Image: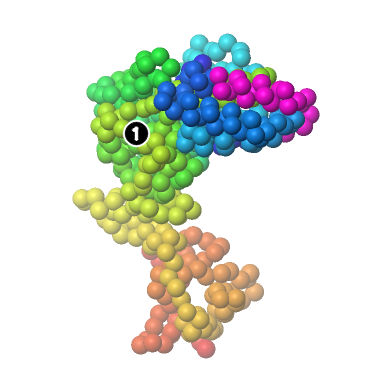
Amino acid sequence: MASVLVLCAVILRTADATPFSSADARGVVEKSIDLISRNYVFPEARAGIVATLKANEAAGRYDVSDAGTLAERLSPDLAAAGDDKHLWIKFDPAHNAALRKPTSAGGSDDFSVQQGRAHNQGYEELRVLPGNVRYLNLTAFYWNGAVTASTVGDCMRFLSGGDAVIIDLRENGGGSGQAVQALVSYFLPPDHRKLMAFHQGADGAGFSTHVLGELSGPRMVGKPLYVLISSATGSAAEEFAYHVVMFKLGTLVGRTTAGAANNDTLYPVDENFVLSVSTGRPEHPISHANWQGAGVSPDVPVLREHALDQAHLLALKKLSARPGTDPTRYDWEIAGLAGKIAPPNIDALTLVAYAGSYGVRTIAVDKGSLVFQRENNPPTTLTPIASDLFAFANTEHVRLRFRRSADTIVGFDLISDDGQVIPIDRSS
């Protein structure tokens, strides 16, 4: 079974229909103990993990007659005993069966092949954001040989057409180190530098990954790169983020990652369970360390829900500062993103001052917000994005800026994203 870097958010599948007894539960626990005793990456920690499980077993914690309940109890105990997010077990008969079958020529089992196909090898969403910033939502690092490599190349051709790139790993729990190697190689020169050394615990052997010399898409060395991370970013996804830091490839935006560095091997246990055991540890050639326990910290800390907008804003500001660039071409989007991330706080008195009639248009205050309406057209909410500047809820292409004479609102301008301005005077 090939080693992978994957952090599993364990899903407990319905097990009520599967015949299961307390004797079966003891068998699962004993098999798990045996696999950990022989394969866990840190020999000095094996005895402590085993002792904890045996103590729990003796106390009757695993004396259950439902497979789902066993997984629900055993999995967090494993993670806690080893302080290792790659130690887990799940009830998953389909994945168990796939692990028992011969792997493909590329080393993938049927389950991984099917999951990779269903999720486009993890490359689930590509978008062009305003300012020609290209966005990729990468939800997992699947590796199915040439199929994945071809998918990566196709997606890199799309990203390479952008002036900046955002890769979203906020929901990426990990996957294959080979898939990380395939992706990060696009952002490094073809110099075959070492990416990561992996030290195996079972036999002391190890292997290393290097920058790939031949790729099926264009390299993007030096292109502005922003990577979104969160506490759910784990394992192989953390490896990619760690490379971004160590090789100075771009900017990390979001929250500190999960801190799961060890690479694991998946074992079928009984006929229904899948056990993950950490069987190796990575070592980066620059830090001579990894992110186990600590996670990878962002360069720009921001709430998870604001990470994409923040990265987009950073990208546009960088692009607007390029020599020979007219920075005003980015002003519209920069203002909108800045207002979305940190909207201005407008007090009730100011809102009331905005309200009134403006010819055939009216502005009213409703439940703490401004509402705009023209004659009998449907009303729409105005959202503040800067001082006296508001966005319409029903269009991204027009904004409203109030005009003042001293401290009095005397009208507003309707401003379109193509530069047109329509002045409207206040009538009452």
Quadrant housing residue 334:
bottom left
Seen in the image, is 147 located left or right of residue 331? right
Q: Amino acid at mark 1?
A: Asn
The magenta segment: 14-34
Magenta residue check for 311 = no
Its colouring scheme is rainbow
The majority secondary structure of the magenta stretch comes to: helix
SS of the residue under disc 1: loop
Q: Determine crowd level at label 1: few under 14, some 14-19, many 20+ residues with C-alpha closer than 10 A.
A: many
Q: Is residue 334 visible?
A: yes
Percent position of residue 168, x then y: 44, 42
Q: Nearer the viewer, residue 375 or 317?
A: 317
Seen in the image, is 79 located left or right of residue 218? right
Percent position of residue 71, x then y: 64, 32
Q: What residue does disc 1 label?
A: 290
- Compared with 224, 339 (above or below) is below
Seen in the image, is 40 located left or right of residue 164? right
Seen in the image, is 337 located left or right of residue 121? left
- Compared with 145, 59 (above or below) is below
Residue depicted at x 28% and y 57%: 327
